[in-house]
Image (tube, rainbow, N blue to C red):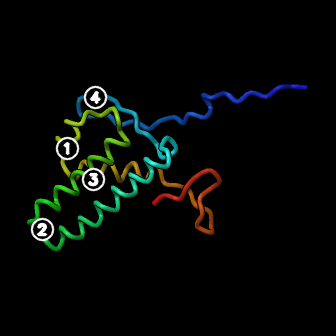
Amino acid sequence: MTTANLDFATLVPERDTFTDGDGTVYEFRSRRDLGAVDRARLRKMQHDASQAQEQLDLAPDDEKIAQTIEQRLEGFIQTILPELPEERIHQMTMDQKNQILRWWNVQNAVAQSPNGSAPPGEAVAG
């Protein structure tokens, strides 16, 4: 009888990277790297930022709402780029933060089956 072996290295996904302006390379956490709690937090941050943006569209001079959006975006980036220094995230423009989030969401889109459910072992992205 032959024995089978599951090599843990095959379970660790290759990671996408982010190269900062100074040339430093940081690894992204992919959706596959995240546990249920982190996924829920990211969905909540996206939802909160989206709702705050709708409010800001109605009251463009409301600094508290603008600050909420910025905090949610920064929290999202800290979750997906945990090694990127917090002060560096604060230095980024809103457009740069949004571009990072858009890129990450495209790279981590969950392929859905025709009935709208996620493949086995994957949760549908929120």
The Cα atoms of the two marked residues, 1 and 3, are separated by 14 Å
Q: Which mark is residue 60?
A: 2
Between circles 1 and 2, the one closer to the viewer is: 2
Lower sequence index among marks 3 and 4 = 4
The Cα atoms of the two marked residues, 4 and 1, are separated by 15 Å
Determine whether 25 is above or below 55 in the image: above
The Cα atoms of the two marked residues, 3 and 4, are separated by 26 Å
Lower sequence index among marks 1 and 3 = 3
The Cα atoms of the two marked residues, 1 and 2, are separated by 20 Å
Q: Are the residues flagged by discs 1 and 2 in contact, CB closer than 8 Å? A: no
Between circles 1 and 3, the one closer to the viewer is: 3
The Cα atoms of the two marked residues, 2 and 3, are separated by 18 Å
- Residue on which disc 1 sits: 92
Front residue of 65/93: it is 65
Q: Residue at x 19, y 36 (%)?
A: 87
Residue at far left of view: 61
Lower sequence index among marks 4 and 2 = 4
Secondary element type, mark 4: loop
- Residue on which disc 3 sits: 72
Q: Residue at x 21, y 57 (%)?
A: 68
Residue type at mark 1 is Met
